[in-house]
Image (cartoon, rainbow, N blue to C red):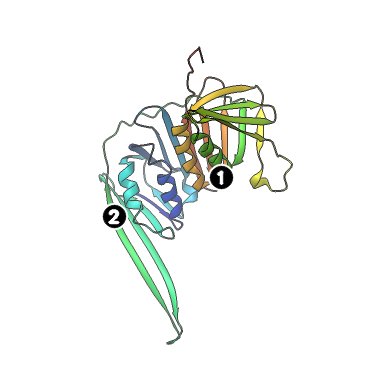
Amino acid sequence: MFEAKLNDGSIWKKLIDSIKDLLTEGMLECGENGISLQAMDSSHVSLVSFNMSSNGFDTYRCDREMCMGVTIASMAKILKCASNDDKIKLQREENSNILKFTFENASTRLYIIISIFLALERVSHYELKLIDLDTDRLAVPETDYNSSIKLPSNEFTRVIRDMASLGESVIIECSKGEVRFSSSGDIGKGQTILRSTASTDEPESAILINVSESLSMSFNLKYMTMFTKGAVLSNRVVLSMCVDVPIVIEYDIVDFGKLCYYLAPKIEDAEE
């Protein structure tokens, strides 16, 4: 038996919404410590990984470890039926090929004329058919990243959006105390430079750049743009980079877990 309930159902809605454009299907791995997923996009260019701790759910039960293959788009359609203030419960019976969803919404209204409170309650039930998927977990090698950029997620979203208006690739150059984003295309070129603001009185808006070795890498903006969807889950984002290994875009979901996107750098032609 598996059952997980979130009083703030918008967290699960936002999580699935932030990966639905990248993944067609994925394996939800459920155990006593929580729920995780790791999958590559259909083009095998990027990888998505999330871990949601059992402690973040309001109620959580998983009698034994189980893997549930799901079609991401189908789950997103079901979750679209839930309001942002709904409570969401996920449930699967032993040996069932169905993942059940329950959406609950209770509101209280005051009718002044008759001076009473009237509670209105709505409960919706949905079922998602599970699919058979390979249960082999992808190996993400341990890497000591020599560049780390921590910044507000809305600032990262803005920079990537601006670069995407110019070209198909973004070059990220890291050096001591600053990071440079640049892009070029048929209409011209542009760049944005961010510098460390560690001394700011507002930690949520601080830009923290830690670089032990200067580097310059190019990435596909189509994917980077999709990675910015994780901004709905966190006010902060961390970019971890190292030469010739995939960049990691990480969003920390406070008191719950984290969502990570991985993307390999583009290999530019020698003549470029």
Tell me what residue is drawn at x 37 percent, y 55 percent: 89
Q: Residue 251's x, y, as percent?
A: 53, 41
| C-alpha distance separating marks 2 and 1 | 34 Å
Residue 36, quarter of the rendered image: top left
The answer to whether 247 is drawn above or below residue 99 in the figure is above
Label 2 residue SS: strand
Q: Residue 77's x, y, as percent?
A: 32, 49
The answer to whether 223 is drawn above or below residue 13 in the figure is above
Depth order, front residue of 107/195? 195
Tell me what residue is drawn at x 61 percent, y 40 percent: 151
Q: Is residue 177 left or right of residue 215?
A: right
Residue 65, quarter of the rendered image: top left
Residue 181 visible in the shown view? yes
Tell me what residue is drawn at x 66 percent, y 36 percent: 208
Q: Name the mark on residue 154.
A: 1
- Is tag 2's residue or tag 1's residue first in the polypeptide sequence? 2
Label 2, on which residue? 126
Residue 120, quarter of the rendered image: bottom left
Question: Are the residues tagged 2 and 1 within 8 Å (C-beta)?
Answer: no
Task: Judge depth for marks 2 and 1 and give the one in front.
Answer: 1
Q: Amino acid at mark 1?
A: Asn
Q: Is residue 201 left or right of residue 266?
A: right
